[in-house]
Amino acid sequence: MPRSSAFCERLQLAPSASPYLLVTSVYPGAGVLDRYPDSFPTELPSFSVVGMEGKRADEINSLLVSLADQLVLNNIGAFNPRQEQWWRGLERSYESVRSSMVGTAKGFTCKIKTPFFEVEKRS
């Protein structure tokens, strides 16, 4: 089983809808496939995943560049990823990218799951 398939299985994501951008507050296990599933956590305490099914490389690149800009503008580095404020900053960053990339952002999905809140958005 490829490592990406193991991540998809554990996070209940369809491999056919990849690629995904995964952000988490903890490293998601050793990822050693010969010890799967024991090398992956049963559940991540906080994570965000952006699905980019069917997107061209230039669209994905545009999303990542815009997201990086928004993370800096939202000063997300000043917060702790174990706190709600960090995840809300990530959510604001995704929302800014989504609204600024009206045509290009169509088809991206975003899910954030934390102990503080859970949200899923589709463009």
Image (cartoon, helix red, strand yellow):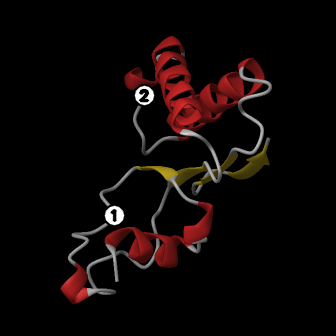
Q: Is residue 55 left or right of residue 31?
A: right
Q: Secondary structure under badge 1?
A: loop
Q: Nearer the viewer, residue 114 or 47?
A: 47
Q: Contact, CB < 8 Å: mark 1 with mark 2?
A: no
Tell me the mark number nearer the camera, choosing from 1 and 2.
1
Residue 15: x percent and y percent? 55, 70
At a point 42% along the width and 40% down the height, the residue shown is 81
Residue 64: x percent and y percent? 50, 30
Mark 1: give few (<14), some (14-19) or many (20+) Cα within 10 Å.
Answer: some
88 over 107 or under it: above or below:
above
At a point 36% along the width and 75% down the height, the residue shown is 41
Q: Quadrant of the C terminus?
A: top right
- The CA distance from mark 1 to mark 2 is 21 Å
The residue that label 2 is drawn on is: 79
Residue 32: x percent and y percent? 20, 76
Residue 93: x percent and y percent? 60, 26
Mark 2: give few (<14), some (14-19) or many (20+) Cα within 10 Å.
Answer: few
- The mark found on residue 119 in the picture is none
Q: Is residue 76 left or right of residue 30?
A: right
Picture mark count = 2
27 over 2 or under it: above or below:
above
> Mark 1 is on which residue type?
Pro
Q: Is residue 99 left or right of residue 45?
A: right
Asked whether residue 5 appears in the rendered view, the answer is yes
Q: Nearer the viewer, residue 63 or 32?
A: 63
Asked whether residue 13 appears in the rendered view, the answer is no
24 over 98 or under it: above or below:
below
> Mark 2 is on which residue type?
Phe
The residue that label 1 is drawn on is: 28
Q: Earlier in the sequence, mark 1 or mark 2?
A: 1
Q: Secondary structure under badge 2?
A: loop
